[in-house]
Every structure is written in C-alpha cells, then in structure tokens.
Amino acid sequence: MPDPEIMYYDAELDVPGSQQHNATADKLAEASETIAKRRSLHVLRDNPIWYFDPDSGAQKAFYGDAGLARTDDAETVVADQLLIMVEVVSTNDIRRERKDTLQQKRLNEANEVPEFALLFPELGDPRAFELYRLDENGKYELVPPDANGRIESATVPGLSFRVLPASKWRARGFKVEVYDRAELLVDAHTARLAKQRAEKRAAKAAREAADAKQQAADAKQQAADSKEKAATAAREAADAKQQVQRAEERAAALALKLRALGIDPDG
C-alpha cells in the first residue's frame, strides 16, 4: 500500500472495477501501447504520477488509467511530462465516479496537463467520451468532434477517438474506437473475435457455394434426364407412326387383292 504521507490513496475508494470497466481499460491500454511505440512514448497505466496537489500544494503521486508521456523512466513521471491522460470512469460507486471525473479533471487541469479525457465504459450509460484541452487561460475546454465524427488529439498528432452510434454499443461491446491517423487500432481480443466472425462467414460462404454447385449439378443431371426422356419419347412416337404407316400399307394391299377377286372390301 502506498505511503499515505506522500501518496494519494483512499482505502474506501479501493473498489474493484466492473468487468466492462476493466475490459475497456484493457482495450484502451493496448491501443495506447501501439500509439506509444510508434512515437517513442511511454504508456502509464496505474503508474504513480507526481502532481502538485491543488489543495495542499504538496507534491504527491496520483494514479490514472491510461496516460501517454515523454519520459525515460515510467516509474518517476511528473505531470509536466504528460501529453494526455485518459480516465476510464468507474460508475459502480458514486465516490469513485466523483474521483475519476471531478477530482481527476481538476487535478490534471491544475497541473496543466495539455489534454484530459473521460471514457464512460458502461454500455447502459448514455455518456461515452469527453476530451478536454487546455485553453489560453489554462482551463479545460471540451473538444468537439470533427466532420468525420473524430475527436482529435492535438498533443499526440494522429491520435483520435470516434464514438460509435449508441445502437452499436451492445453488439460491439464497447463505445469508442481509437485511431492512429486512418488506422483503426484493434485490441487482440477484438481482433480474435473479428477473425472468428470472418472465418464463420467464410465457412458459411464455402458451404453455400458447395450447395449451389451441387444444385447446379443436380439441375444439369435433371436436364440431361429430361433430354433423354424427350429423346426416348420422340423415338417411341416415330416407331408408333411407322407402325401405323405399315398397318395402313398392309390394309391397302389387302384391299387391292380383294378387289382383284371381285370382292368389295368396303361393302
């Protein structure tokens, strides 16, 4: 446990996050790692970060969910090194929610962290994502989405967030997508699910193609059978016609013989 004399720690707020909170934090951390590696930054996830406490003025270590910083030592980060801090808000306890939102926002603003974001993970919560940026007066100002629905970071060029339509939250299992320029950053779990869905679609398409091929073969065979039946019927009709013709010829010949004998075959 951190030393309460120098570290900000409240045992009453040490409440486990919900499953959705933890899953969202994991997704955010994976995306942040990708962003960090490409820019020689460090990801701070539950690392102690040294801030000046706005209430006491003393320097204390506080914690955040996902921060990006320029530092050579992730264990001794000060607020001045932060580029952005994202807090995944715990809403399963009102005290933790106040800490994650009001207190953390005030703390980061007072220490002039350039950007601070709140991510609300619970799917039943209408709130989703808020990015704040320091204005010229040193106060946080809410950053609106651009024409493409992206909320762009100014301190980490290329990093942006997009809030999904609420109708897709439950199907996707999360609310916010993270982008590095045009690239959607997908965490390993989501990538596995996407791969499984793609494999299922491919297997279904293969089955449907096989069924269609079999149906085509069956139709071809039926057509061949029908053609053979038609040919047989035509032969049978020709044979019947010939039989009728021969019978008529025999009858005519017999009539001639009878007439030769003076017998009228029609009488």
Image: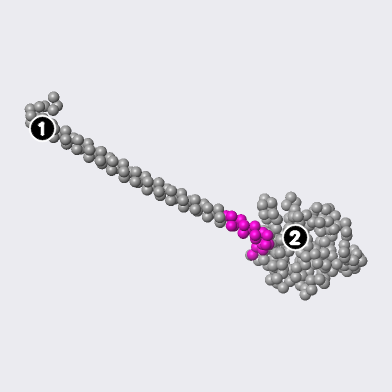
Give the quadrant of the N terminus: bottom right
Above or below: residue 59 compared with residue 209: below
Q: Residue at x 65, y 57 (%)?
A: 193
| Location of residue 218 in the rendering, given as x and y in whole percent from the top left corner | 43, 48
Q: Tell whether label 2 touches label 1 (CB within 8 Å).
A: no
Locate residue 238: give its quadrant. Answer: top left
- Residue 5 drawn at (x, y percent): 92, 66
Quadrant location, the C terminus: top left
Where does the image place residue 142, in percent across and percent down from the top left? 76, 60
In screen coordinates, is 26 left or right of 254? right
Q: Quick one: SS at disc 2?
A: helix
Q: Is residue 142 visible?
A: no
Query: x, y (%) of residue 236?
Result: 28, 41
Amino acid on which disc 2 is placed = Ala
> What is the residue that sits farthest to the top in this orientation?
267
> Which residue is disc 1 drawn over?
257
Q: Is residue 226 left or right of residue 54?
A: left
Determine which residue is flagged by label 2.
25
Q: How many marks?
A: 2
Q: Given this view, does label 1 or label 2 mark the residue nearer the observer?
A: 1
Question: Which residue is at 27% across, 40% downward?
Answer: 237
Identify which residue is drawn at 69% across, 71% down.
Answer: 38
Residue 151 quadrant: bottom right
Over which residues does the magenta segment extend?
A: 183-201
